[in-house]
Image: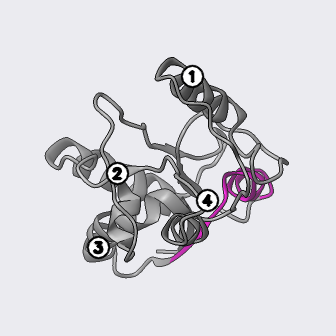
Amino acid sequence: MGELTVAFLASTASYLLPPVVQAFRERYPDVRLTTEDTSVATLVDGLRDGRYDAAFSRPPLVDGLAARSLWPPWHRKYDEDFRRAGYEPDVVQRAGSVQNLLGLVAAGVGVSRLARSAHSLRRTGVVFVPLAGEQAATQVLWLPDADKPALRRLLEVVTELAARTDLTQSG
């Protein structure tokens, strides 16, 4: 049946990877499925250079940027939201991964705004406070000219899974 390499943005891997991979492997056990969690810049580059056949990410997509600027539109939105709430964050340290951010919060260095999926990485010293009305979309991405049977099968599985399961409950 072939092989398929799928990238998951690190913030989607903890809640989206298990049901997608399980459903795909049950239906297509002969396809060699490889997964990787990565940053958005690596994910975009990997799709472009053929390293990944598909990827699960959050919009907007950007590439080739450093840690704080991985998603500049999101950071601008977060800064605006904080200002509207009367809070001006004093950024003293940045981190490139959810685990590092949670570690800094646990150490008392500050606060962080993360996807709900980070809650699955529970840490002593960290309190998760849901933000009313907040939800981040997740998208499956592939190159438009990709014509791989295993990719078409993955997209079918994801479409069926999304139709019968609320995949947002953990993300």
User: What residue is shown with label 4?
Assistant: 53
The amino acid marked with disc number 1 is Arg
Mark 4 or 3, nearer chain start: 3
Disc 2 to disc 1: CB gap under 8 Å: no
Mark 3 or 1, nearer chain start: 3
* Quarter-of-image position of residue 126: bottom left
The amino acid marked with disc number 2 is Gly
User: What residue is shown with label 1?
Assistant: 83
Residue at left offset 52%, top offset 52%:
111
- How far apart, in angstroms, are the residues tagged by discs 2 and 1? 25 Å
Mark 2 or 4, nearer chain start: 4
User: What residue is shown with label 2?
Assistant: 171
Please give left or right for residue 31 compared with residue 35 in the image.
left
Q: Secondary structure at mark 2?
A: loop
User: What residue is shown with label 3?
Assistant: 22
Residue 56 higher or lower than 139, as above or below: below
Question: Is 36 included in the stretch rendered in magenta?
Answer: yes
Q: Residue furthest top?
A: 84
Question: Is 59 included in the stretch rendered in magenta?
Answer: no
Residue 145 appears in view: yes
Residue 1 higher or lower than 78, as above or below: below
Which residues are the magenta region? 34-49
